[in-house]
């Protein structure tokens, strides 16, 4: 079948299971191969028909243009039972109202405050590392990002201990929710196994902590500069009401769930590619040394780290968390000239699209410089979708950029990470794209002796071409210094 034809021809399928086995066994290969069948390809997942969408135009149609004709479908319905009805798992009018109420917590004016907390957490965390130690970098980053998201959620004094408690309870919950969302038969996860008991007790513990903090915050009425304060203060512009305690708890759970592993895995992949590309690593180290010289970047330093940002942009292109996004039609629709009935699943893989050679030449080469001056264009055309797009676009994208570049800069200014001998890192599929393992050896970096550049208005070493990026990304007037995006 010729690429680009709006085909309705399906690839060969097995009896009964259809394409479900191929999709489950190796989803990345499945999505790469199915591209050659056309723009929109019908498949069968057991008895149910689904449609795979292969072009950025059609992805845009689903995520943006016809967004109101879709909900998030079965997987998030499963998540709702454990996570509650927060942004990740709610739909329709309820989701729209909640999104309006949560949005102010992620407004550009709040991000510098979170940036300060992030820098502080990163500094404490990496100071405990030992020269020569082999670290499970993926797990270490999971701990670090959970601490960051917990601390930016609750930034009051008691919070380091509470953040640790949340972190420890959240880890089995993240793994357990993923397992339950991906399980084809719900009954297996309902058995009273030790894992289920631990999972349920961690969820209860999280609810207790969150409810307790909400009560304290309501009583004080203060703005602590954290995510929860802003969620508590938010009032709906239509009816001037705020969130109930239960709604707040659901939204806290949603942010803890969506905001930790995604960053951890993306940064983990970045270290994986840096380990394989010493020249790129060297350039990134040189940039970081010139700006922060041995310390963790502060929010104000971030516009001076354009190469670090490009490295992360490229890591997200190749290894972004959303290996698959799915939606379900709420009405009969027409998509790319094909009629799709109500209740059908529509699937696509941002990762696979971001490795399409027709869109990204030489797509398997890690080349941060392909992003020089390109970001805005790709966002508009939906050819770069690590944060999705439209009404369900990641609400924490600016937060995520600041957090990721702070972590990368904070680690690279002190440590060089090299792959541990014998490690074999493969992409594995959970809700996000996870490295199978990531053991890396730590080498304390020598002080380069390079004088740090001034805190603002400085240039990166490769400034000539980067000026455009940095100029776009200055943190004034409500724009994020890393993404350059205006606050919503
Ligand atoms: C590199 C890091 C991250 C990536 C790649 C990422 C990616 C995504 C994607 C792809 C979605 C939309 C899924 C869909 O369209 O079905 C999403 C939603 C969401 N993300 Fe992120 N995310 C990241 C970090 C964060 C952080 C740090 C937070 C919060 C602190 C966060 C909070 C959320 C929430 C609450 C949603 C649901 C939004 C809604 O449906 O209205 N994410 N994220």
Image (cartoon, rainbow, N blue to C red):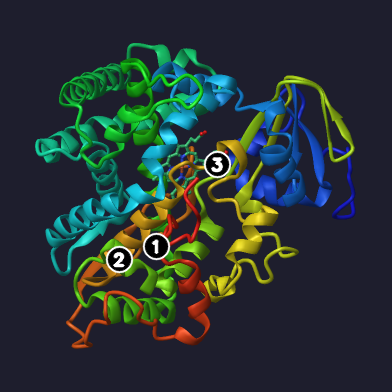
Secondary structure under tag 1 reads loop
2 or 1: tag closer to the N-terminus: 2
Q: Mark 2 points at which residue?
A: 300
User: Which residue is found at the position 46% from the left and 66% from the top?
Assistant: 473
Please name which of the two marks, 3 or 2, marks the residue nearer to the observer. Answer: 2
Residue 311, given in percent of the width and then of the height, sits at 46, 68
Q: Residues within 10 Å of mark 3 (few under 14, many from 20)?
A: some
Circles 3 and 2: CB atoms closer than 8 Å? no
* Disc nearest the viewer among 3 and 1: 1
Residue that numbered label 3 is attached to? 393
Name the residue nearer the viewer: 147 or 216.
216
Q: How many marks?
A: 3
* Residue 418 location, quadrant: bottom left
Q: How far apart are marks 3 and 1 (CA)?
A: 21 Å
Secondary structure of residue under mark 2: helix
Is residue 275 among what the camera can see?
no
Q: Which of 131 and 300 is in front in this view?
A: 300
Disc 2 to disc 1, C-alpha distance: 8 Å
Tag 2–tag 1 contact (CB < 8 Å): yes
Q: Is mark 3 within 8 Å of ligand 1?
A: yes
Give the number of the disc on residue 448: none
Q: Residues within 10 Å of mark 2 (few under 14, many from 20)?
A: some
Q: In this view, does 438 lie above or below 145?
A: below
- Alpha-carbon span between mark 3 and mark 2: 26 Å
Q: Is mark 3 on a helix, strand or loop?
A: loop
Left or right of residue 430, residue 50 in this image: right
Q: Give the x, y percent position of residue 381.
A: 70, 55
Q: Residue at x 36, y 62 (%)?
A: 405
> Which badge, 3 or 2, comes first in the chain's sequence?
2
The reply to whether dot 3 and dot 1 touch (C-beta < 8 Å) is no
> Disc 1 marks which residue?
475
Disc on the earlier residue, 3 or 1? 3
């Amino acid at each position: 079948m010729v690429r680009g034809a709006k085909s309705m021809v399906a690839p060969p399928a097995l009896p009964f299971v259809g394409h479900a086995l191929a999709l489950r066994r190796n989803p990345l290969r499945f999505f790469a191969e199915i591209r050659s069948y056309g723009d929109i390809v019908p498949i069968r997942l057991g008895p149910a028909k689904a449609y795979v969408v292969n072009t950025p135009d059609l992805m845009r149609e689903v995520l943006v243009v016809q967004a109101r004709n879709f909900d998030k479908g079965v997987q998030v319905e499963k998540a709702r039972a454990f996570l509650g009805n927060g942004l990740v798992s709610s739909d329709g009018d309820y989701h729209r109202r909640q999104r309006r109420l949560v949005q102010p917590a992620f407004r550009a004016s709040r991000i510098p405050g979170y940036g300060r907390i992030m820098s502080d957490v990163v500094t404490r965390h990496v100071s405990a590392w030992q020269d020569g130690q082999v670290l499970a970098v993926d797990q270490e980053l999971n701990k670090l990002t959970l601490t960051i998201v917990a601390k930016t959620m609750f930034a009051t004094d008691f919070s380091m201990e509470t953040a640790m408690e949340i972190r420890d309870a959240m880890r089995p919950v993240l793994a357990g929710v993923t397992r339950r969302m991906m399980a084809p038969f719900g009954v297996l996860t309902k058995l009273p196994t030790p894992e289920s008991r631990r999972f349920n007790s961690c969820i209860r513990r999280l609810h207790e902590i969150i409810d307790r903090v909400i009560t304290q915050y309501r009583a004080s009425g203060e703005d602590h500069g954290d995510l929860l304060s802003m969620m508590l203060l938010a009032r709906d512009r239509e009816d001037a009401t705020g969130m109930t305690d239960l709604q707040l708890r659901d939204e806290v759970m949603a942010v803890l769930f969506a905001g930790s592993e995604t960053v951890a895995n993306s940064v983990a992949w970045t270290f994986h590619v840096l380990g394989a590309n010493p020249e790129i690593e060297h350039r990134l180290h040189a940039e970081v040394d010139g700006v922060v010289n041995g310390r963790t970047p502060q929010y104000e330093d971030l516009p001076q780290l354009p190469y670090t940002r490009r490295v992360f942009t490229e890591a997200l292109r190749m290894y972004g968390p959303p290996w698959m996004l799915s939606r379900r039609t709420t009405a009969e629709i027409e998509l790319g000239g094909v009629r799709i009935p109500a209740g059908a699943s529509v699937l696509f893989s941002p990762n696979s699209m971001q490795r399409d050679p027709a869109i990204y030449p030489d797509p398997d080469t890690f080349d941060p410089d392909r992003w020089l001056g390109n970001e805005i264009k790709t966002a508009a055309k939906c050819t770069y979708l690590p944060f999705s797009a439209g009404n369900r676009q990641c609400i924490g994208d600016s937060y995520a950029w600041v957090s990721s570049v702070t972590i990368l800069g904070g680690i690279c200014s002190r440590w060089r990470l090299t792959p541990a001998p014998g490690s074999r890192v493969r992409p594995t599929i959970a809700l996000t794209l996870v490295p199978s393992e990531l053991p890396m050896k730590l080498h304390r970096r020598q002080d380069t002796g390079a004088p740090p550049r001034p805190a603002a208005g400085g240039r990166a070493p490769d400034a000539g071409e980067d000026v455009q990026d940095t100029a776009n990304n200055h943190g004034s007037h409500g724009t994020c210094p890393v993404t350059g995006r205006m606050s919503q």
